[in-house]
Image: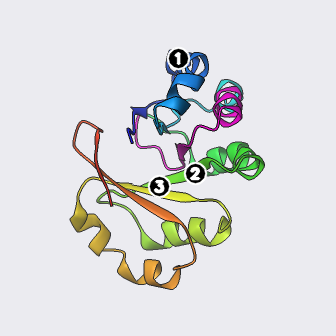
Amino acid sequence: MYYPYLRGKQFELILLRENAEFIAENDIHPILEPVKSEFNTLNRTLKTLCENEVNCTIIVNPQVGGNPVKITSILQNLVSECYQYNNILLGYILHAGSKTSDLTAILDKYKTIPFSIIHYGLQMVKKFPKPFNLMTTLKIIFLLMDLQGNCTKNI
C-alpha cells in the first residue's frame, strides 16, 4: 500500500480524478490535507475516487499555509461526503501542540466514520494512551510519517 500525501491543490485533485482507476488498481491510498476553504473541487474529486473504490483520508486539522483551513469548516463541508461513501477516512495530525480533548471530541462525534491518525514519531502516540483505550470499537489507522511527509509504516 502506498500513501501519497497531497495538499489538495487544484492540479493534484485533477490528477487524482483523471487517474482514479489506476489508483484503485494499484492499492494507493491518498491522504489529502486541504489548503483552501472552497470545497467544490475536493468534493468532486472525492466522489470520483469513491466511485472507483479508492480509499482516501481527509485531514481535518490542516497544518499548512499561513492561515490553515479551520477544522470546523472541513467538518461542516466534508463530513456529509464521508457518510455518503464508506471509503473516505477522517484524518488527524498529531503534533507537539495536539490536545487530547480536540482529538477525542472529533472521535466521539464521528464514531461511525473510519479514522486515520498521522504522526511524526511513535513518541507522539504515547501521549494519548487513555482515550484510545476507551475507544476500542473505532477503526483507527496509525500512519508513521517521515519529515518529508512520506508514509514509512502503517502501525
Nearer to us in this view, 86 or 131: 86
* Residue at the spot 50% in from the left edge and 52% down from the top edge: 91
Quadrant location of the C terminus in the rendered image: bottom left
Is residue 62 covered in magenta?
A: yes
Q: Which residue is mark 1?
A: 15
The residue tagged 3 is 92
Residue 11, image x, y percentages = 52, 14
Residue 52 percent location from the top left of the image: 66, 32
Tag 1: residue type?
Answer: Leu
- Magenta segment range? 44-64
Which quadrant holds residue 147? top left
Measured from the top left, where is residue 7 in percent x and y? 45, 30
Q: Nearer the viewer, mark 3 or mark 1?
A: 1
The residues bearing labels 3 and 2 have C-alpha atoms spaced at a distance of: 10 Å
Q: Is residue 65 visible?
A: no
Here the colouring is rainbow
Q: Is residue 28 above or below residue 144?
A: above
**Left or right position of 105 against 122:** right
State the CA–CA distance, disc 1 to disc 2.
Answer: 20 Å
| Residue identifier under label 2 | 89
Report, in whole angstroms, how far the alpha carbon at label 3 lies from the one at label 1.
24 Å
Residue drawn at the location 44% of the way across and 83% of the way down: 133
Decide if residue 97 is in sight here.
Answer: yes
Q: Earlier in the sequence, mark 1 or mark 2?
A: 1
Dividing the image into 4 quarters, which one contains the N terminus? top left
In this rendering, the answer to whether 6 lies above or below 95 is above
